[in-house]
Image (cartoon, rainbow, N blue to C red):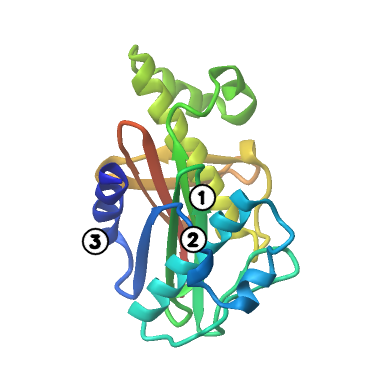
């Protein structure tokens, strides 16, 4: 949990003012959410129930920080969380941890957050997931552990980008969105097909075992 806390603390000051991020280990939070919320996954496996309950638990935490008293976070038809009308948010799980971010709709159009284990992504998959420029950035270091962290960061950024863009439906395709890892924990996005930069904000932080990314489409 210490590494996850460091990742959150690194990204928190980079986010828009009214954007809150929280999270922690996946544990038995089933009794901490409403019966209405629990009913959404009552037929699921125990592991899925715990993941869902922790997601809702941390989601309620960030809503409280934003001054929102919203007792039930329902589910949309596509399975995504049904946030209050004036809130935009995102939830991510690994097998062990859950991270939630949310902000006010007055400031943010959409957002996506993703937490990944740095060692999970098999190098055999890199050529199918990444563009030639992304592969070059990954292979610029001869350190295999460093390569895995870079690959995980780019993959996580693509996942967060997809979550952010999904309700907007502006872009498609993992390899059609090119990610650059910049200094100061910033991400830059490039649309390969149109040969144009994408005006989404992105931030990332890598630890020894995990990488955390968040992508935001701000209100103009």
Residue 2 location, quadrant: top left
Please tell me whether mark 1 sits on a helix, a strand or a loop: strand
Callout in the foreground (1, 3) = 1
Q: Viewer-proximal residue, 12 or 166?
A: 12
| Distance between mark 1 and mark 3 Cα atoms | 22 Å
Please tell me whether mark 2 sits on a helix, a strand or a loop: helix
x, y percent for residue 172: 68, 48
Circles 1 and 2 in contact, beta carbons < 8 Å: yes
Q: Which mark is residue 93?
A: 1
x, y percent for residue 7: 29, 48
Q: Viewer-proximal residue, 29 or 51?
A: 29
Residue 122 location, quadrant: top right
The answer to whether residue 217 is seen in the rendering is yes
The crowding category of the residue bearing disc 2, from other C-alpha atoms within 10 Å (few below 14, some 14 to 19, many at least 20), is many
- Quadrant where the image shows the C terminus: bottom left
| Distance between mark 1 and mark 2 Cα atoms | 9 Å
Callout in the foreground (1, 2) = 2
Q: Which mark is residue 13?
A: 3
| Distance between mark 3 and mark 2 Cα atoms | 24 Å
Please tell me whether mark 3 sits on a helix, a strand or a loop: helix
Q: Viewer-proximal residue, 172 or 205?
A: 205
The crowding category of the residue bearing disc 3, from other C-alpha atoms within 10 Å (few below 14, some 14 to 19, many at least 20), is few
Q: Earlier in the sequence, mark 1 or mark 2?
A: 2
Q: Residue visible at 49% across and 29% down?
A: 134
Q: Which mark is residue 54?
A: 2
Q: Is residue 206 left or right of residue 189?
A: left
x, y percent for residue 104: 43, 79
The answer to whether residue 110 is seen in the rendering is no
Q: Is residue 215 above or below residue 104?
A: above
The crowding category of the residue bearing disc 1, from other C-alpha atoms within 10 Å (few below 14, some 14 to 19, many at least 20), is many
Numbered marks: total: 3
As drawn, which residue projects farthest toward the top? 142
């Amino acid at each position: 949990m210490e590494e996850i806390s460091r990742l959150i603390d690194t990204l928190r000051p980079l986010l828009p003012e009214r954007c809150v991020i929280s999270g922690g280990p996946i544990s038995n939070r089933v009794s901490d959410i409403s019966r209405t919320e629990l009913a959404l996954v009552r037929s699921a496996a125990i592991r899925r129930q715990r993941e869902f309950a922790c997601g809702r638990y941390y989601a309620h935490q960030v809503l409280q920080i934003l001054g929102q008293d919203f007792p039930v976070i329902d589910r949309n038809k596509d399975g995504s969380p049904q946030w209050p009308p004036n809130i935009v948010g995102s939830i991510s799980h690994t097998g062990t941890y859950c991270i939630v971010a949310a902000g006010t709709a007055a400031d943010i159009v959409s957002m996506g957050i993703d937490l990944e284990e740095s060692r999970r992504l098999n190098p055999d998959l890199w050529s199918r997931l990444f563009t030639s420029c992304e592969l070059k950035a990954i292979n610029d270091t001869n350190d295999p552990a460093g390569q895995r962290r870079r690959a995980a960061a780019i993959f996580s950024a693509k996942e967060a980008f997809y979550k952010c863009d999904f309700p907007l439906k502006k872009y498609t395709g993992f390899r059609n969105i090119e990610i650059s890892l910049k200094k100061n924990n910033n991400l830059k996005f490039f649309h390969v097909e149109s040969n144009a930069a994408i005006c989404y904000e992105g931030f990332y932080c890598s630890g020894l075992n995990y990488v955390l990314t968040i992508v935001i489409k701000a209100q103009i």
